[in-house]
Amino acid sequence: MKYSFSLILICLSLCVTRAQNPIAAPTGTGTTGEADFCRWQDVEGYWWYGGKGTGLCRYDGYETESFRSDRQHPNLLRSNDVLCLTEVPSRAEIWFGTKEGAFVLSKSDYTIRPIEVSNGMETNELADKRITCLATAPDSTVWLTYRNQLLHFSADCTLQERLETMWQGKNRSVLRLALGADGTLWVGLWNGGTLSFRRESGVWHPEEHSSDDFPVVTSSSLSPDQQKQQIDSLMTLFAPGNDAKVLSWVTLPDGHIYIGTYHALYLYDGQKVEQKMDGLDKVRSMAYSESTQTLYLLSKARGVCRWKEDQLKVLLDSVQYRQMQLQGDTALLLSEGISGIRLLDIRTLQLSADTTQASVRPVVTAYVVGGKRQLLPYGQRQLTFPRETDLVEFSLSTLTFEQPSRVQFAYRWKETAPWTELPEGKHVIQVAHLAADTTHLQVRATDMYGRWGASTEVLTLYRPARWQESVWVWLSLAFIVLALALGWFVWRRKRATKEDRLDEGKLQEETDPLSVADREFMNKAMAAVSAHMTDSDYSVDALASDLCMSRANLYRRMRGITGQSPTDFLRNQRLEQAAHLLCTTSHSVNEIADLVGFAYASYFSKCFKEKYGVLPKDYKDAPR
């Protein structure tokens, strides 16, 4: 069962249409608005189309992006009925007309703006007008029509001039519009009639033509591109609305032209266009053999065919080929075919082996970051992502539009890295952890037969590094940890040294040459003081009582053994205990003062400094 490309695009738009932010489009000759569906393939290869209620749509072979007024964008377009399209390649813009005004979509940022013409009352003349035709001239100016008005705009949407269409003295609305290669403006009118406008000395001169008065497009002075434009203009004016797109043509020795379109084969004899056969479905290429007076054509639906004496015969029922040339009268060269260049001997109908590499060009069509899908701006090859970006998705396409489910993609991040291949039919690259700083994405693809192409799409991606991804941050943290470890080690060494010194002092006291009686006396005195260490009221009298001695005897005995008074002994015992607690505990100075029997912390600090030369709070770190 055969489907036209228009029907396919309409179905796809209903299935996978996505609403995006306001946007604009590309360049080209005009597309008329007679049919309820219009389409345009831009210089990048994307298909742009529109129809009743669809808004402006872009199709990349996998997904359709739609630009229309909806709940998310209620004021994007005044009408979602798109009637005509054209492209201005020099500005990367798509111009399109609707039932209520004309708009421009910029492919640089995918924003849409209306085309405005002041009518002297601070309102837009085009705001409520049905725009019927758009056409781009070779100088990137654009012709726009509504009713019987022909408006000529510069590429920046400035109105340059205005023409009116009159037929036999009466206003007649424009139905179709085409630009000739010689600068002639051809206009088809409603209810019949054709006008041509030729510019002479800066003035446009209209001329009326009957239905049999057609432009002659064969001229030795025209280049192939100019002749193609003339033929496009001819078919736009006189072919059925759904079959005006010229795919191929060939000029016969007598000047007649065979024209192949999306659906049919036509013959132009310089006077009229005659449909020779319908239902061919994309006449991709044609070649004519003068020796046999035979036309050979390549149809997507029927393969390689022969047209002679108004009869079509299928020679090779193979639909994978796209271009065709005759080598002599017997050999047919199928060029740029998906399965390669092969030679077909028309007499034996035998094909040679495959001799060429696949010709596919992968492109990145869109990307998703932060859950938001964004189209890749026209000509942009570098993307910058926020610092916190992790997950990114890239949508790919080859823009061939034929069996995309059989195309396979592969990607890599470095020139020397191995390729990562996606499953057949999958066109989305998912990056879970986007590398910091600058990386380069390279992509390649196969054709529908699995042959890899040589060309790659390269994108430069940049994401600022997070603080934890910086080498200098980790080096600084390592330095801090090392400094803390070294400080802790030094502190532990100092503390161990102080404890050793205290132990040495005690050992020296224990080894002093005292008598047994004096040692017992001193042990009892120290035990008594230790037992009442926390008692700030424990005095020399209390110590004498505990030792069963008078105050005077205690004084004489203590002075004789230690050389110090009982008061000094009592205070020194408390201070020595305080020094030990300072080195071995984490108590504060006030707490230690209470633990060693000093009622006032200030007095304790004073006494401690007199004995040890430093205040209690500095004792821990003071050298000994």
Image: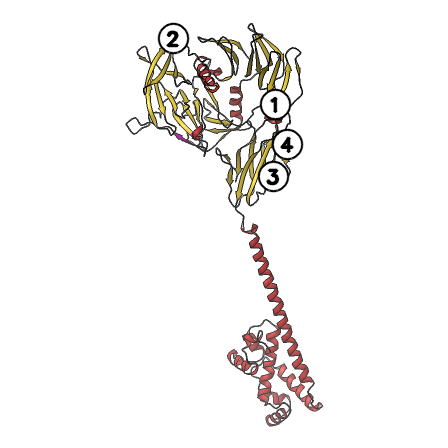
Label number found at residue 207: none
Residue 459 lies in what quarter of the image?
top right
Q: State whether residue 211 is above or below residue 449.
A: above
Residue 82: percent from left, percent from top: 43, 23
How many marks can you see?
Answer: 4
Circle 3 packing at 10 Å, graded few (<14), some (14-19), many (20+), is few
Label number found at residue 210: 2
Residue 294 lies in what quarter of the image?
top right
Badges 2 and 1: C-beta atoms under 8 Å apart?
A: no
- Asked whether 570 falls inside the magenta stretch, the response is no
| Front: mark 4 or 3 | 3
How far apart, in angstroms, are the residues tagged by discs 3 and 2?
A: 63 Å
Judged left or right of residue 130, residue 382 is right
Q: State whether residue 283 is above or below residue 549.
A: above
Mark 1: amino acid = Ile
Q: 353 or 103: nearer the eye?
A: 353
Mark 2: amino acid = Ser
Say which label, 4 or 2, has the lower sequence index: 2
Say which label, 4 or 1, has the lower sequence index: 1
Mark 3: amino acid = Glu
Q: 284 or 368: nearer the eye?
A: 284
Say which label, 2 or 1, has the lower sequence index: 2
- Mark 2 lies on a secondary structure that is loop
Q: Which residue is mark 3?
A: 415
- Mark 4 lies on a secondary structure that is loop
- Please state the extent of the stretch shown in magenta in the rendering: 105-117
- Mark 3 lies on a secondary structure that is loop
Q: Which residue is mark 4?
A: 423
Say which label, 1 or 3, has the lower sequence index: 1
Q: Which residue is mark 1?
A: 338
